Amino acid sequence: MKKKQQKQSKITGENRMPGDPYPEKIVETILRVDHAGEHGAIRIYEGQLAVLSGTKAEAPIREMMDQEQRHLDKFNQLIADRKVRPTALSPLWHVAGFMLGAGTAFLGPKAAMTCTQAVEEVIDEHYESQAKQLGDDENELRAVIEEFRMDELAHRDKAIEEGAEETPGHKTLSRAIKGGTKLAIWLSKKI
């Protein structure tokens, strides 16, 4: 007789080693950094719109910004419900996001799209990593992250469609933006 194989549920942090964060800390960090990231994304788009309003680039930027606002609203709710402290770096991301958006937009609409593509490629990996950290005890949060990850991938694809990869110096600009995005994620986890 075959033994019934039971599907074992994975619990957040179940393979924790000494010195690893507790499950509550994992979730807290995820909420803190994702909240900061969605705020930063909106500020990037606001900076881009400050320069590109009234151009052909305005419509796709506004559409992506509207989705980011929906994401931020959800993370605002989650950090309030779970009583998680936002990153202390929010004022810095408020300014830096706008400057990144405006700065890339000053280089032209395709450079603004390079910014979107680069940021979204980092966020794709970031959200994928977070979803893997969460167990079945955090199904709802994992579903939110996976849904938002699909939106971010659509933003990346839209940026490519809008000519991101045609930007002069695309690889260099993309690499710099990705490095800054990874640094912002790391700092927001810590502070």
Image (tube, rainbow, N blue to C red):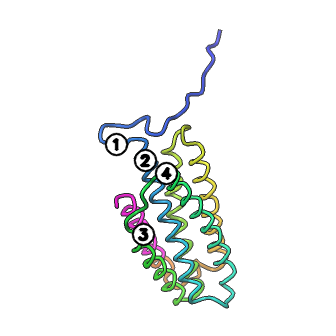
Residue drawn at x 48%, y 86% is: 103
Left or right: residue 179 compared with residue 141: left
Question: x%, y% of residue 174?
Answer: 48, 75
Circle 2 or circle 4, nearest the eye: 2
Residue stretch rendered in magenta on the structure: 174-191
**Marks 3 and 2: which is nearer the front?**
3
Residue position for label 4: 129
Query: Cα distance, mark 1 to mark 2?
Result: 9 Å
Three-letter code, disc 4: Ser
CB contact under 8 Å: marks 1 and 2: no
Could you tell me which quadrant the N terminus lies in? top right
Residue matched to label 3: 90
| Magenta-span inclusion, residue 185 | yes
The dot on residue 26 is: 2
As helix, strand or loop, the secondary structure at mark 1 comes to loop
Disc 2 to disc 4: CB gap under 8 Å? no
Point out the tag, 4 or 3, that comes first from the N-terminus.
3
